């Protein structure tokens, strides 16, 4: 697939993610995530964000979404800029989530790195303000 096709795929996925407030996880698995994916997150599993860690198995990756949605409620997920070169797409925007235990909201800039092969994501890494999110998750 072309860089433009990868960008369009992600634009649709992020629109669905925001519109469903994170409730349509299957959209990612059905349309974006490949059979093999290397997934990472800047907290690297540090408490209280243990679910935000490295995954190299598509089946285990579902636990990321399960734990995220069990502890947090999405306020918005707004991706505004897409930069594509070859098989890589970098997406920049912002997101806000409210912690279900503390009631606090974390609003943070968000950058996502994607690598595609044959129209499916094979690599992903997310960057966000971990300090802001930890404060929201801490009573």
Image (cartoon, grey):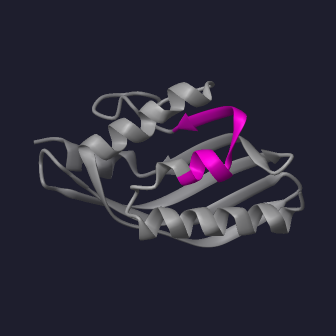
> Looking at the rendering, in which quadrant would you find the C terminus?
top left
Image coords of residue 60 (percent x, y):
52, 25
Position of 68 with respect to 61 (left or right) is left
Q: Is residue 132 magenta?
A: no
The answer to which of 93 and 58 lies nearer the viewer is 58
Magenta stretch, main secondary structure class: strand
Position of 77 with respect to 93 (left or right) is left
Q: Write the residue at 79% across / 47% down.
A: 116
Image coords of residue 32 (percent x, y):
67, 50
The answer to which of 41 and 13 lies nearer the viewer is 13
Position of 60 with respect to 2 (left or right) is left
Q: Write the residue at 30% across / 52% down.
A: 132
Work out whether residue 54 can be spotted.
no
The answer to which of 12 and 130 lies nearer the viewer is 12
Image coords of residue 62 (percent x, y):
48, 34
Image coords of residue 98 (percent x, y):
23, 57
Instruction: Give the magenta range.
Output: 27-41
């Amino acid at each position: 697939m072309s860089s433009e096709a990868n960008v369009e795929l992600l634009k649709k996925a992020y629109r669905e993610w925001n519109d469903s407030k994170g409730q349509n996880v299957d959209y990612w698995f059905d349309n974006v995530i490949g059979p093999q994916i290397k997934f990472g997150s800047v907290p690297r599993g540090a408490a209280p964000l243990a679910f935000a860690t490295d995954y190299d198995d598509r089946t285990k990756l579902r636990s990321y979404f399960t734990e995220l949605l069990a502890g947090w409620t999405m306020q918005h997920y707004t991706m505004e800029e897409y930069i594509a070169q070859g098989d890589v797409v970098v997406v920049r925007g912002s997101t806000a989530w409210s912690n279900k235990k503390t009631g606090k909201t974390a609003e943070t800039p968000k950058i996502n790195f994607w690598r595609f092969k044959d129209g499916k994501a094979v690599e992903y890494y997310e960057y966000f303000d971990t300090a802001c999110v930890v404060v929201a998750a801490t009573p």
